[in-house]
Image (spheres, rainbow, N blue to C red):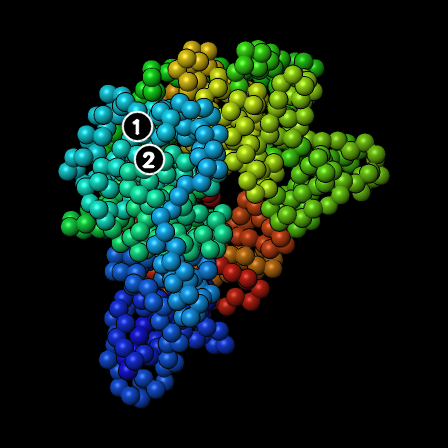
Amino acid sequence: MYGVSVVLPTPAHSRLPEVLSYRHSASLPLGTLVRVPLGARELLGVVWMPAQGMDEPELATLKPITSVLDVPPLGKAWVDLIRFAAGYYQRFAGELAMAALPPQLRDLDEVQFARLMKKREKMMSFPRRRESTDVAMDSRLRGNDQVTGTDDGVIGGNDAACELSPEQEQVLAQLQSDDPRPKLLFGATGSGKTEVYLRRIEQVLAADEKAQALVMVPEINLTPQMEARFQGRIEARFGAGTVVLMHSGMTPAQRTASWLAAHLGHARLVLGTRLAVLASMPHLRLIVVDEEHDPSYKSQDGSRYSARDLAVYRASSSGSSERIQVILGSATPSIETWHNANGVGRYQRLDMPSRISSAAMPKVRLVDMRLQQKGELMAGGLAPALMAAITERAERGEQTLLFLNRRGYAPVLNCGSCEWKSACPNCSANQVFHKKDRRLRCHHCSLTTSVPRQCPLCGNLDIGMQGRGTEQLEEMLVAQLGTKFRVLRLDADSTSAKGSLEAQMASVHAGEVDVLVGTQMVTKGHDFRRITLVAAVNPDSALFAADFRAPERLFSLLMQAAGRAGRDASMSGQAEVWLQTQHPQHLLYKTLAAHDYPAFAATQLAEREAAAMPPFSYQALVRAEGRTQELAQAFLDSAAAVVATEPEFEPWRDPASKNYVTLYPAVPMPMQRIANVERAQMLVEAPSRMALQRMLASWQPYLRELKTTGVLRWALDVDPLTI
């Protein structure tokens, strides 16, 4: 008998050890999947350490492993990745390990798993055939038989590779160099980054018959279009079934099938969202992180890891014998990535500043809303000149994209006679008015109520609306344009039904829509060939936010939205971007109008360096949730007292030391209450990443032992994106 160390899905805030010991009749390899008892339950676990020699009395105290799944071990490289991620993000290894495995796998016992594998082997014995419906959908997503419906570059029908531009050829040559640094592919929207990804993937897979590649995208709604293009190219060359998807929108059975295909080496290319970075891919040689700046790559709950940063680590830790190349692509890189490529030279920057086929970047027009007469504004808040431009383009057969990052009809209802507003009783937020079903909905806790006929406080029958959402904008456009032109709204409400997003996107690409109204889900990653006008209706709302990263997010969002215009070279001459703003002189808008991301990034880096903000310092947040705000903050105050008094933390308490760690006072979170749970946070900051990591690691045991009466949960968020 052997003693076997196993990790289970136990969170760091639990009182259980990170690694548990069991006994088994054989010495199990590192990364073996096993089922073990824990209390009254039986859980999936991963063998985490080599077998330990134990004497009989010790072994007798251990529970036996229930069963061993008949699948190859996950391997040392994967175990090392999870160990690093767990250590850096201050989580338990089992929590991250289970997040990397498909949910269905966690529920299958040894017999059920054996049946699944037998069924898979039977399916693998038959060649996969692309159905005619798949081909038809590919064609609709493509918009026509000449171009795809993906973000960058143009390819011919039947997924044939196009002729490369000089910039693309130069970048591909640089990607084949021996420089081991991560690559920042800094390319304008429409410059052909996706075609570069495809060419590099083909080179890597052709050089080694076992090689695998991973392509990550930030949003689920991008995967159908990306899948059509990557599947058409890669499977045509390397065989059917060599491309699989990984994202949370798949069924449990689909996720399990994709994971097994990647783990067993049958899949040559995995296309997925952030969870794909933790996939077991034993022959991984290339990682592409498309739109690397996107906040979606940072998990905001659970393990709170950054998929982009883990991709860079996974490539750097692979060793010289199995080198993994990582490509970070973006037209608006994150400030941290830009600094790594330009300030410290940690990354290699590759530039593609020109659009494919010499298409021009759209002209940016700032509409000063201070000069607009309120009586002249359209009901949806559009300037008359913008409405005229929309009508003109619709009459020419061109498309317009209106971007408003607020769904619903109106953000809040209010009474003009008293101070009543449609506040959510469970959250520190207002319920949003949705006119289609005349309901008030909270977008945080999902509470839905009917619209009151009169003010609940004073009885006033005249309840008004504040602000506007995509529903209201759509209604106004339909009223103005009539039945001659079609208006389509794309947001989380209009695309909630299964398959609706793909169908509506296909209608846009097919030219069946004249005006597209949407939230940020339509501003990135889509190649709308007929759009010549993009307008941001109310971008100022994020201009003066307290979060120091707000300008970066706004600039990226607006530049990505602008990139949807004029992607067809034949129409690029008349492409325009209109920004309705109260602050046309703001530096952010000026650099945006010039399409000058380097100038914007330089100002942001200068401000952050002066304020000692990331990337010139390192941060973590301790978040607590409790029954009351006082209890949540009391937990954080107790945690801070540990650092201030315990001798173990002396190295981090000296302000004159380079290892000094600052703990700011506990405060309510910006969204203080969600679903009747009060939330508080405490910022921890240090000039040294190593000092912060060591201090957090020493702090963890104390946090777990603190009295948590009235505190529902707590969590550490390393490198937080929102403060």
Q: Position of residue 102 (x, y in %)?
A: 43, 57
Classify 418 as above or below 473.
Answer: below
Q: Quadrant of the N terminus?
A: bottom left
Dot 2 lies on which element? helix
Dot 1 lies on which element? loop
Q: Position of residue 664 (x, y in %)?
A: 44, 50
> Is 363 situated left or right of 281 in this image?
right
Q: Which residue is located at x 41 percent, y 13 percent?
A: 570
Q: Position of residue 267 (x, y in %)?
A: 32, 48
| Residue 336, quarter of picture | top left
Residue 691 versus residue 491: which sits nearer the camera? Answer: 491
Classify 333 as above or below 688.
Answer: above
Three-letter code, disc 1: Ala
- The residue under label 2 is 233
What distance separates the C-alpha of mark 1 from that of mark 2? 8 Å
- The residue under label 1 is 161
10 Å crowding of disc 2: few (<14), some (14-19), many (20+) = some
> Is disc 1 in contact with disc 2, using a CB cutoff of under 8 Å?
yes
Q: Which residue is located at x 37 percent, y 76 percent?
A: 65
Classify 667 as above or below 536.
Answer: below
| Residue 450, quarter of picture | top right
| Residue 339, quarter of picture | top left
Q: Is residue 654 visible?
A: no
Q: Position of residue 559 (x, y in %)?
A: 43, 25
Three-letter code, disc 2: Arg
Q: Is residue 163 visible?
A: yes
10 Å crowding of disc 1: few (<14), some (14-19), many (20+) = some
> Is 691 situated left or right of 505 in this image?
left
> Is 176 situated left or right of 671 in this image?
left
Q: Which residue is located at x 67 percent, y 32 percent?
A: 409
